[in-house]
Amino acid sequence: MTKILPVLQAVCRFNAGQRTALGLAKGVDDGRTNIISVNVETGSKSIMQLKDTGAKKVRLKYNGLLPQKAIFGLWNALTKCSRNPKILQSQADQLKEGLSQRQFPASPKEVQEARHEIKKMLEAEGGLPDRSSVSQKVLEALDLELKKKVGKLLRNARYNWKPLDFKTREHAAAYTLARLAPNYAEVRFVLQEFVNNEYIPKTVLDYGSGSGAAFWAAFEQWGEQVKSYQLIDPNEEINQFCMDVLRGNGENSGHPFVHPNISFRKFVAPSLNNTFDVIIVHRLLAELASEESRIELLIDLWKRTNKYLVMIDGSCKGGYNALMEARDYILMGGCELHREQTRQVLMEAGVLNEEADSILTDQQLSNYMRYNLIKNMVHLI
């Protein structure tokens, strides 16, 4: 008996290599191809009919250079530093190299395991005497020496993480000199995605603003169509230097900064009524000591997001993993069902039945599938 599979249609955009691999030759079958799709949760099969839109990729309309006002602002801010320009540039180059190799903090469990392994290695290599045959003072001295060696090896590995801290104006200047342009280019590249949906926000938050690169990218993208920008960073020195850069060339129509409505804060306002159309978090996740603190920040910012939460990080493995953690938390957190609470809600609404109860207790269903089944069932009742 021949089984008829359901047919699903999808319109996609492919590159040349993907078109060849899928058999989407131009002029053949109207650019369509069929593939067998298998649901990994249920094992059911269907036919996925793909059609190539042939749409061209949106090309960037900028060359990655800082806006002229940002360049003038940086120049004016640097002239107020007491340090020699050559020394500042040298420090900026060193800082840039260090930041390019910056790793995400290891978890406490990883540090503990690494410490234990290093200690075992040193004990094996050192030929330490039998602990039962030496005095207590000798044992204490040996333990202290071993602790110093373990700490030194940990500091030379990725376990010496410390958050960035700017103690002086010159340190903030060196960081801005090193990272303003590349950070601006990264954020500007991502914000180009908004060209496709022609979205223009009214309020923008640059969280963990640092040098202000995300502001400059947003300002170049939307300009004064945005009613207000807010920049948040807990460090006073980097905030002050960022303010000086945002003064641009000083020709701001009587306003202190290049936009008439820019506010600075050290911390986000506690009220959840303080929301923003777009929140940008750029290269901040590496400054948080643990996954728990990153998720805590994500929850707080998500509650304050009206439309888009834009998270951008570096190309290292830690940055990728942190972004995937954030994405998965939002996707799964949005569809997770607490069974007893859901059962109580359905019961109070008078829609709890045997089918709903079986869906809530079926261990074979993923959270996402359980959520969709309950949602669809409630809509049908």
Image (cartoon, rainbow, N blue to C red):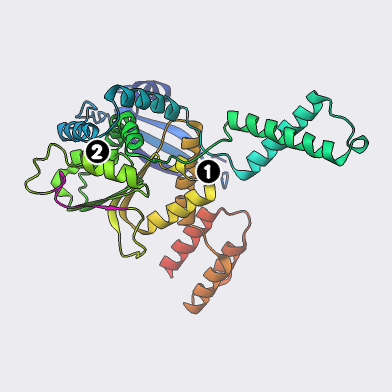
Q: Which mark is residue 217?
A: 2
**x then y, percent, for residue 337:** 52, 62
Q: Please give the residue where the numbered disc 1 appears in the rendered image.
A: 39
- Choose between 1 and 361: the one closer to the eye: 361
What element does badge 2 sit on?
A: helix
Q: Quadrant of residue 281?
A: top left
Task: Please tell me which residue is depicted at 79% across the width and 39% down the height of the picture.
Answer: 140
Q: Is residue 215 left or right of residue 121?
A: left
Q: Residues within 10 Å of mark 2 (few under 14, many from 20)?
A: many
Q: How many marks?
A: 2
Q: Where 349 falls versus 228 (above or below)?
A: below
Q: Where 155 falls versus 354 (above or below)?
A: above
* Extent of the magenta region: 256-265
Task: Please tell me which residue is depicted at 33% across the width and 43% down the height of the picture.
Answer: 237
- Choose between 55 and 290: the one closer to the eye: 290
**x then y, percent, for residue 284:** 41, 42
Q: Is residue 199 left or right of residue 374?
A: left
